[in-house]
Amino acid sequence: MADDAEFLSRLISFGLSEKEAQLYLHLLKYGPNPPSLLAKSLKTYREDIYRTVSSLIDKGMVNPSIDSPKVYVAVELEIALDAALKKHETELREMERRKQELQEMSKQQHFRPSDEFSTFKILKNTGEVATTAFSTLNSVEKEWIAVVPGIITVFSSLYALEDDKKFLDRGGKIQFITDITYPYVEIIQQHLDLEMEVRHLDKYSGIMFFVFDKKISMTAINIPRKVSLNEPISVLWTDDATYADYLASTFEILWEQAIPAEKRIEELLKESPPQV
């Protein structure tokens, strides 16, 4: 049977936040529990438990009891995962519908973008960021690079791997840097299997960004706490080539400081080898 760390990793790769995965696993292992005992067992505050449980209820993975005092019950794993999957599918279908509507509207508007001026805009939720990133990727010719936290690699694994594969198949190059911890090992391996170049930078806390062909960039002002297409976020998008070049230079410096992802994964597996 897989150990807890591997099980948590798979839950996170399925779209749960680390806190959601820990709480759901705890309920699966130890059965129904009230908020007070959950807070004590998971070494956190009741308010934090209420927020996490609310999110899991919304995903269809936890149910509250009717009786008092209230306890929370984990939904059977297969049913819970099906519910979470359907939620993601619904969100993606909605994004695709909005994309088609916007494309039709743009044809009617006869937009005339100019290459003479740089433009800037703030993206305010993860769905908007995803739509913009996918649209940008379709126009990228050579490469995209990024410095991102682990939670963004989960988002990429769920929503972007197919587009990334198409980009790589047509000769593109992808490099990114992240802080690789055990819950993200399997997710990073998925990216490596596609022949992306990935490096680990321990406990990196600097600026998070993407750069496409050294022309367009996306810089995160704040990072979402969980994977969802409607999470609030602030991302600066710009086609200012000077700023993109500055970020690309920053990336090159960080790349030299970082270590290959393969080496980091090997270290982590030696520290916490999966059980068979």
Image: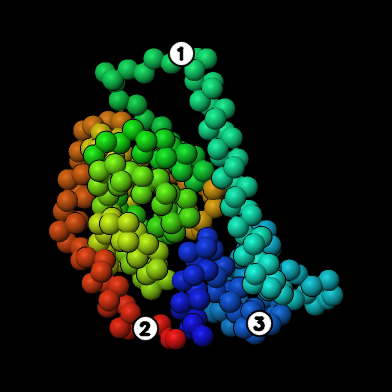
Q: Residues within 10 Å of mark 3 (few under 14, many from 20)?
A: some
Say if mark 2 contacts mark 3, CB within 8 Å: no
Circle 1 residue? 110
Circle 3 residue? 37
Q: Position of residue 204 (x, y in %)?
A: 29, 62
> What residue do we see at 40% from left, 40% from top?
133
> What residue do we see at 80% from left, 77% from top?
69
Q: Position of residue 188 (x, y in %)?
A: 35, 63
User: What amino acid is labelled 3 in the image?
Assistant: Leu
Q: Secondary structure at mark 3?
A: helix
Q: Quadrant of residue 148?
A: bottom left
Q: Position of residue 168 (x, y in %)?
A: 30, 47
Residue at the extreme right of the image, as rendered: 67
Figure colour scheme: rainbow
Q: Quadrant of residue 28?
A: bottom right
Circle 2 residue? 272
Say if mark 2 contacts mark 1, CB within 8 Å: no
Could one spot residue 73 in this view of the protein? yes
